[in-house]
């Protein structure tokens, strides 16, 4: 007498979690267990884990012919996430477990040989999808904190296969994940912009970049504080919304399999080394995983020593800077990851780093300087909203008793959040994302500002993209001053942040 059971689970495909129907068919015949439905090696190996887990949970493993189908058949399945649903299907199909409301649940978890439930990667997208379809999800304790990030989702925590079975047999109840997020306690030292002595123009540029989400390139000799400034950008950025935080957490979940609760809603800061490959930046692999530009989604991507990155790596940044996403094509299919990041970069003006420095230490030839600067293509440089020179400041000036006390990040953050609020009320996005049509609608210039902008475009022979970027930055400067109309001083400051358009380094 054949018997059939149907159990629901979720696959991991990028930041998506498509539904997988686990069908278990038990029939008379020579004892065997086969898994169909495009399973990877780790899924095929689950039959041995499931067998041991069922026996060690005091159930009988049937000496019959068992066929397990993971539908849809054309969707690749990987990992140990299907262990628990397969075991549940076998127990239901053999009549050892009566679970009438099994179709109201989804299951994710790898089984130990003892029957203990182990955590898996990519739980967060599965929680969001199961909530959309009004099903409860059962996961391992190791995934509890990650699952708690999604409010209003019904997620149960099970320590073992036996706990799950007792829940459906009404012998005991599984505990629900506490979805009430408390303010995370973070005892780590916070980087503060007030730690940076001097460099007031650079800090002003950083504030504008934070307020409008603009990309920024800092150019200057070694030791002028470029890296120190960039690493403190996140301290003045506004917190992520819950939707943005969930997107960022989902990317980390599928990449690393965990999420640091203390970083909830905080903008991520990614700083890959200049030896990083194009695959490390973009993402890839047999089953594509997100790269650095996707892991920086809704946060900051900092590229220190920009010309030291390979030309191929730098050129792959151009498309996601415009589109906000990255597509990875493989033989098995195409996968898209979000990549809306704020690009901050730093570089020296020449190979030795001291071109134009007051120390007079540069001995680079013009050919060496030209070769060094040409490592960065014109189209990539054109995509930076702001380009700024960060000069050396005398040590005596920085540490003298008369040195002005620097403004703290908390004070700057108030102005940044206020400007961002104006932008979202106006266009529901930061100024850096305004389209050409939206620029015409929202960027009202007075006569003197318009004349200055047009004359600057003619004099510097700027592209249409550079024109739009100047306008976006000017709009942000006006927002910081709570001015609806863009004035001449706003345009003048925005043009001043186009260093490379005013001549090479």
Image (spheres, grey):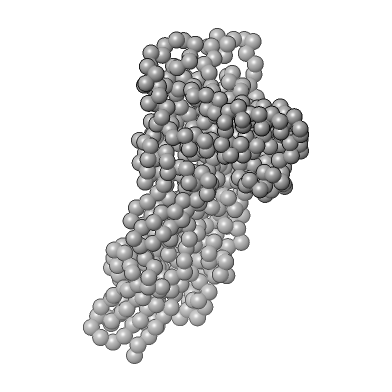
Q: Is residue 333 visible?
A: yes
Residue in view at x 76 percent, y 32 percent: 447
Determine whether 155 is above or below 492 in the image. Answer: below
Q: Residue furthest bottom?
A: 1
> Can you tell which quarter of the image residue 469 is in?
top right
Report x, y in % for residue 428: 67, 49
| Quarter of the image with the N terminus in it | bottom left
Residue at image point 61% right, 39% down: 468
**Looking at this rendering, what residue extends furthest in the left direction?**
30
Q: Nearer the viewer, residue 374 or 173?
A: 374
Looking at the image, residue 236 sits to the left or right of residue 118; the answer is right
- Is residue 414 visible in the rendered structure shown here? no
Query: In this picture, is 313 found above or below 386?
Result: below
Name which quarter of the figure residue 353 lies in: top left
Of 447 and 67, nearer the camera is 447
The picture places residue 338, in percent across and down from the top left corner, at: 50, 51
Q: Residue at x 58, y 39 (%)?
A: 464
Q: In the picture provided, is 265 more to the left or to the right than 158?
A: right
Task: State the count of labels.
Answer: 0
**Apparent side of residue 488 relative to residue 148 in the rendered image (left or right):** right
Q: Position of residue 130 (x, y in %)?
A: 53, 66
Residue 491 vertical position relative to residue 269 in the rendered view, above or below: above
Instruction: Please name whichever residue, 373 or 171, is drawn nearer the observer in this view of the structure.
Output: 373
Which of 6 and 71 lies nearest the eye of the viewer? 71
Image side of residue 139 versus residue 447, left or right: left
Tell me what residue is drawn at x 54 percent, y 40 percent. 342
Where does residue 462 sit, x and y in percent of width and height?
57, 33
């Amino acid at each position: 007498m054949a018997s059939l059971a149907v159990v629901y689970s979720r696959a991991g495909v990028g930041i998506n979690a498509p539904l997988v129907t686990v069908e278990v068919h038990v029939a008379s015949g020579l004892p065997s267990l086969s898994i169909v439905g495009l399973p990877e090696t780790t899924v095929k190996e689950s039959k041995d884990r499931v067998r041991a887990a069922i026996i060690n949970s005091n159930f009988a493993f049937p000496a019959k012919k068992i066929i397990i189908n993971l539908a849809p058949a054309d969707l690749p399945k990987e990992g140990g996430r299907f262990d628990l649903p397969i075991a549940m299907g076998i127990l239901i199909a053999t009549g050892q477990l009566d679970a009438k409301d099994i179709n109201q649940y989804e299951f994710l978890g790898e089984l130990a040989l003892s029957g203990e439930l182990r955590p898996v990667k990519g739980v967060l997208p599965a929680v969001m999808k199961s909530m959309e379809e009004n099903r409860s999800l059962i996961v391992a304790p190791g995934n509890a904190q990650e699952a708690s990030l999604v409010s209003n989702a019904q997620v149960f925590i099970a320590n073992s296969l036996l706990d799950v079975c007792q829940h459906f047999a009404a012998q005991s109840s599984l505990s629900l994940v506490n979805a009430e997020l408390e303010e995370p306690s973070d005892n780590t030292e916070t980087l503060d912009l007030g730690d940076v002595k001097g460099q007031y123009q650079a800090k002003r540029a950083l504030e504008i970049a934070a307020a409008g989400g603009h990309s920024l390139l800092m150019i200057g000799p070694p030791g002028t504080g470029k890296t120190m400034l960039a690493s403190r950008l996140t301290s003045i950025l506004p917190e992520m919304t819950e939707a943005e935080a969930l997107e960022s957490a989902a990317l980390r979940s599928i990449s690393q399999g965990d999420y640091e609760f203390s970083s909830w809603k905080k903008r991520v800061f990614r700083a890959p080394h200049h030896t990083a490959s194009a695959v490390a930046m973009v993402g890839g692999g047999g089953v594509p995983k997100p790269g650095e530009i996707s892991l920086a989604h809704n946060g900051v991507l900092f590229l220190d020593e920009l010309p030291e990155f390979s030309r191929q790596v730098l050129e792959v940044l151009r498309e996601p800077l415009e589109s906000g996403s990255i597509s990875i094509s493989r033989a098995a299919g195409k996968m898209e990851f979000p990549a809306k990041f704020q690009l901050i970069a730093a570089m020296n003006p020449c190979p030795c780093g001291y071109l134009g420095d007051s120390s007079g230490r540069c001995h680079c030839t013009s050919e060496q300087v030209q070769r060094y600067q040409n490592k960065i293509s014109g189209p990539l440089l054109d995509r930076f909203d702001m380009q700024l020179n960060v000069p050396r400041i005398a040590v005596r000036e920085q540490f003298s008793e008369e040195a002005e006390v620097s403004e703290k990040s908390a004070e700057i953050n108030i102005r940044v959040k206020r400007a961002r609020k104006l932008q979202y009320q106006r266009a529901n996005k930061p100024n850096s994302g305004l389209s050409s049509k939206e620029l015409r609608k929202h960027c009202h210039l007075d006569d003197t500002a318009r004349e200055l902008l047009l004359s600057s475009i003619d004099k510097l022979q700027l592209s249409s993209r550079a024109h739009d970027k100047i306008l976006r930055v000017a709009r942000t400067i006006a927002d910081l001053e709570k001015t609806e109309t863009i004035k001449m001083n706003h345009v003048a400051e925005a043009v001043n942040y186009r260093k490379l358009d005013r001549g090479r380094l």
